[in-house]
Amino acid sequence: MRMKISKFAILSQQWGLPGVLITLLMFPSLFLFGQKGTPLNPAVPQALYLLETEQTRKALAELEQAVMANPLESSLLYYLGYAQIKTGDRTKALASFNKGVEVNDKEPLNYVGIGWVDLLEKKTEDAKIQFDKALSMTRSKNVAVIKGIAEADLVDNKYSVDAISLLNKVKSSNDTDPDVQILLGDTYLIQNSGGNVGQAVSSYENAIAIKVLDAKAKSHSDAKAYFRIGTVFQKSKNNEVAQENFIKSIKADSNYTPSYGELGEIYYLNKEAEKAVKTYKKYLSLTENPENPQYQYQYAFFLFMAKDYKKANDVFSKIADAKNVTVTTLRFYAVSLFNNDDFKKSREISERYFAKAKPEDIEANDYMYYGKSLLKLKQDSLAALALQKSLDLNKNQPDVLQLLGGAYSKAKKFGQAVACYKQLMVLHKTPFASDYFLIGVAYYNNNQFEQADSSFVKLIEMQPKRIEPYAWLARTKANEEEARKEPGLAKPYFEKVMELAAGSDKNKRELIESYNYLSYYYYDKKDYPTAKSIYEKWLAIDPNNKQVTDALETLKKIEAKK
């Protein structure tokens, strides 16, 4: 089983944007300085980091508090709007940017923000007016303004040439800003249809090579750059290199949330279940909304793969009752419940799955697990129907054929059981000893003694030292005696059972069965001494059997008459 549910794919569906672009939009790229060498309000870098590490509510709260504490600092309103764009709230973002212009119409960043919203709303000309205004106000020298415009241009790859032109100007005059390189990498990735992957990776590597004096800022930028490289290789299915970079990202910043999420997915795809669970558990401990159904859904699959069915069921149960629960969730929840021996609940969830799934999407395994649950609940007739449906979808299922044969046998439909075991032997090509045993017992119970005889003879050839084949052949021969009018057909086989059972307590039932047949055989032949010796052996292992004591009393009387 393989299941990968990417948060980027979910957002892509919601926003109608390419997956790579969604990845870029989710994580802020602004560096920590505004005008050249002018530190930002301390709330800004902290908020941007919170945005990057999936703590959006905290980021917004941080910026809102900063705005309240510094009402005349209009750049804070830009960063608040920036955070609001990142969380998908354009209306609030535009209000923040407009408020920033009201507070200080000389602050260029808020014009960048307004232009960004215009681009998102496909108002290209309006956006250009706002961007040109911001650039003219700063003579195209304000790094934060240029990076803001370049990041806004990421909304569509048709603006990528403009973004690269702006960023290259910044790079030539300021080569100590890792975020310029990261933004360049982001832009190269969305260029044209396939993106310029080589240049993107080179830009991210350049970001890592830049030496930043602030150790904390360095760890953040390195973590971000390694994460970006990891996502590039992840999307190209090079999971080995992607994994290396996600690990490097985490080493650079042990709290870099998104790297844990993607690394967990890679471990899952590599079938490294324990690592997947551990890593994704860490991701959930860091992300702002661990109860998000999509995150819980993914975590449940990781636990399922790790065969921690109890914990998987705890997680599945949280999302299974949602109105929009997926059929895939119900399918794997039912299997997980079965594997944790909760057969009643497994049946219930399977039935919900069948009610919700499209008929063409139902798989053979779905009916198989449903049938197995019904068998465990001793609902053999219903189980047989489910198992037959499974075989209708996939005839090449030896285990299901065997289960179905067993279900028919329990329901005393021995003819149908025989048919199942015949198919099973065809699938096996070279039948197993167990095949001959199962079909032999089914023939026996269906009063097809001749066929049962042949099956048990074959079984004895394959397992000459086991007692069961002789016991079943002896029973079969005993039933054939009357029809063939040949008393004693079963005698050599019951004697063989006695021989194999000698000195063992494991086969008491078979031994008693042999004593019963042989004692009567010799009694009927009037060989009373032999009959008596067998009854005495019988009494030794079954001292409270009245049938035996009565028979011995009768034999004593016969001896007395002599």
Image: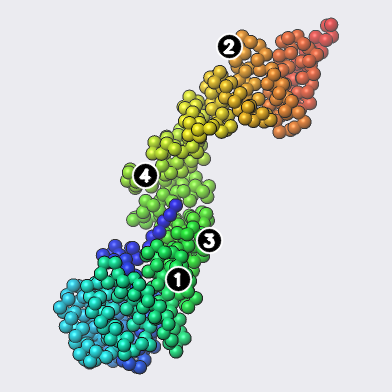
Q: Residue at x 45, y 74 (%)?
A: 249
* Location of mark 1 (residue): 246
Q: Tell me which label, 2 or 3, sits earlier in the chain.
A: 3
Q: Which circle's residue, 1 or 3, is located before the other in the chain?
A: 1
Mark 1 or 3, closer to the camera: 1
**Residue identified by numbered label 2:** 483
Distance Cα–Cα, label 1 vs label 3: 17 Å
Contact between labelled residues 4 and 3, with CB atoms less than 8 Å apart: no
Which residue is label 4 attached to? 362
Amino acid under disc 2:
Ala
Q: Amino acid at mark 1?
A: Phe
Q: Secondary structure at mark 1?
A: helix
Q: If you read the primary sequence from the N terminus, does the residue marked by circle 3 or circle 4 appear first?
A: 3
Marks 1/4: CA distance?
A: 37 Å
**Which of pointers 4 and 2 lies earlier in the amino acid sequence?**
4
Residue drawn at the location 32% of the way across and 78% of the way down: 184
